[in-house]
Amino acid sequence: MNILSISRGHNGSTTLMVDGEIIFYLEEERLSRFKYDGTPLAGIVKAKEYVDHIDHLVICHTHAAMDQQITDWTREDFYASLVRKIFKADTSFDAAGKVQYPFQVHHIHTTHHELHAACGYFNSGFDNAACVIVDGAGSFIHFPKEVDWVKASATLSRSTSPMFEFETIFHVDDPMDFSTVYKHIGTNDPVGFNNPGPDLFITEFPGLVKMYEAITQYCGFPAIEAGKTMGLAPYGKPNDLIPPIIRDGWGNRDLFSPTYPNAAEVVRQRFDCIKDDMATWSGEGYTDFQKDMAYAVQEATSEEMCNLIEKAHNLTGETNIVVCGGYGLNCVANYKYAKRFPDLNIYVEPISHDGGTSMGGAKKCYYELTDGVRPMNQSTIYYGPKYDPATYEDSIKDFEVSDTSYDDVAKLIREGNIVTIFQGRSEAGPRALGNRSILFDPTIKDGKDIVNRVKHREFFRPFACSILAEKAHEWFDLAGMDDTPFMMYAVDCLPGVEDKIPSVIHVDGTCRIQTVTNEQNEHYYNLISAFEKITEVPILFNTSFNLGGEPLVETINDAISTLKNSDIEYLYLPELQKIVKIQNDEEEE
């Protein structure tokens, strides 16, 4: 059974599954080179390289396809039409003139949060769990048609705006039934507070992610780049002038004005402290008040997430908790849960953002179509397409290429060089895990500033590190966790560690870490081990292989292009045990 599943919104992605096994997962931006790209056409084309037919096409999003997504003449769904053409499917017209496919098309747009939950649930390996889903604005729910089981108040029935999923808790003890035990739905209209069912709250109050996005924009970043706000937050402090982010258990509507499905906006005219701050902000640098706002939203929303996790446990009795949705990428909050709930088994899905919904759609569809056969458990996150290293030779032949070894590369890094590594299948999600990474010496005091300048990133943004799994507990407090292979937690460093690896420790004494074993990534493990031999530090500074504002590199040609347009000179190809030295275009001129 060949299932092709796509997520067509921002962070659009393609998942190809054959007989329950993921053949590849790929975000559209990696192929199009356009950050956060949607409409995964290139991903669909890529699927043709691996299979010659599709049995099921799963189309995932938060709202139904618009008229613009219907093809001319044949009046087909845009994506189904593309699959038909690429795979040269045996297609016909029925008596009504409608195109008939040899594959089945599944449109999923009313259960966006359930797709997040399916991704996290099936990847967790749990048999039963409570799934806590928190993201920006899930499925567009128009009242009362799609929610006709709600007994609405008179105020709510006058709402003309669509409604959006903000926070959901599912109980899964049968994968055929993701049972909703709590859901917060929001709307732009001033409908107040409505509790039309024991598990449903429909309000005018913003969700956690919408508030986070609002302050992200207030700090001068695009709403979708909330990770920057997370990095800025430790530079802030408690500030009594800031109005409460959350009031009486809900987002403060006095502070946030909804503009869903876009980010909410910080209401500036009501508060003198905000008006005064924005009057002095030139758009360059970051004011102390902006830093304090970032701190406030990080603290308030992560605390509310803890409340939701506790609610999930209390409502379901489950000790297995799955966290997914966009907020699942908040590695600072994730560490807070680990410390707060040592008796719960909390799995945070590494592909938490919307791209992961194509994987959730594929896995849930497979389970249902096979009457309860679980998709294969795959503990890796290297889901990208397969490449033949022999094909790299042609791409690197015009540059200085030398045979190398783990020891040689470790020495190169120790000498203060930035070295990129390119190998195998790319990582799913936003974290670089040694297959598409930029590496540096973590012991260099101003290393963060050096690499931020090279990558054209903001000065305050921290970097991650990769550490030999067996040494992790000697350097970091993992809050009871055995490991963190997907870099989903910003953990506290142990006393004295900051002095040893200053370039990867953030201002708050934390570091987002990846634990590495030989089984997970042999070449990368051996390189870190070689670095340890000459430094007694079993750690490498690791950041994503891209420049600021660009997607991670996907192909060998992407990697070469990045080096040619930066001050980075070295590309390490461990599968060939070769090092490539590339001068950038400015140096050549």
Image: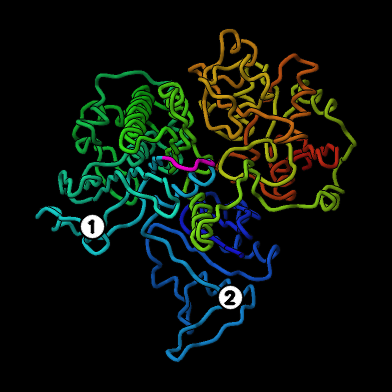
Magenta residues, dominant SS class: loop
Q: Residue 274 placed where, x, y %?
A: 26, 29
Callout 2, which amino acid? Arg
Give the residue displayed 64% in from the left and 48% down from the top: 383
Q: Which residue is at 70% across, 64% downward?
A: 49
Q: Nearer the observer, disc 2 or disc 1?
A: 2
Q: In front here: 233 or 124?
A: 124
Which type of secondary structure does the marked residue at label 1 adopt?
loop
Q: Identify the residue at horizontal 32%, vertical 30% (top origin).
A: 307
Find numbered disc 2 in the image and state the secondary structure of the residue it sits on.
helix
Q: Using the rendered view, name the quadrant where residue 534 is placed.
A: top right
Residue extending furthest right?
403
Vertical placement of residue 396 versus 345, above or below: below
Q: Magenta region: which residues?
A: 125-129
**Amino acid type at mark 1:** Ser
Query: Label 2 to label 1, Cα distance in Å?
Result: 36 Å
Neighbor class of circle 2 (other Cα within 10 Å; few <14, some 14-19, many 20+) is: some
**Residue 523 included in the magenta stretch of the image:** no
- Residue to which mark 2 is pinned: 84
**Residue 126 lies in the magenta stretch:** yes
- From the image, which quarter does the N terminus lie in? bottom right
Residue linked to disc 1: 161
In the drawing, does residue 58 fall left or right of residue 455?
A: left
Q: Position of residue 371 (x, y in %)?
A: 50, 60
Estimate the x, y position of residue 51 in percent, counting from the top left: 68, 66
Q: Foreground: 364 or 328?
A: 364
Res 246 → quadrant: top left
Q: Nearer the viewer, residue 352 or 390?
A: 352
**The residue positioned farthest toward the top in the image shown:** 496
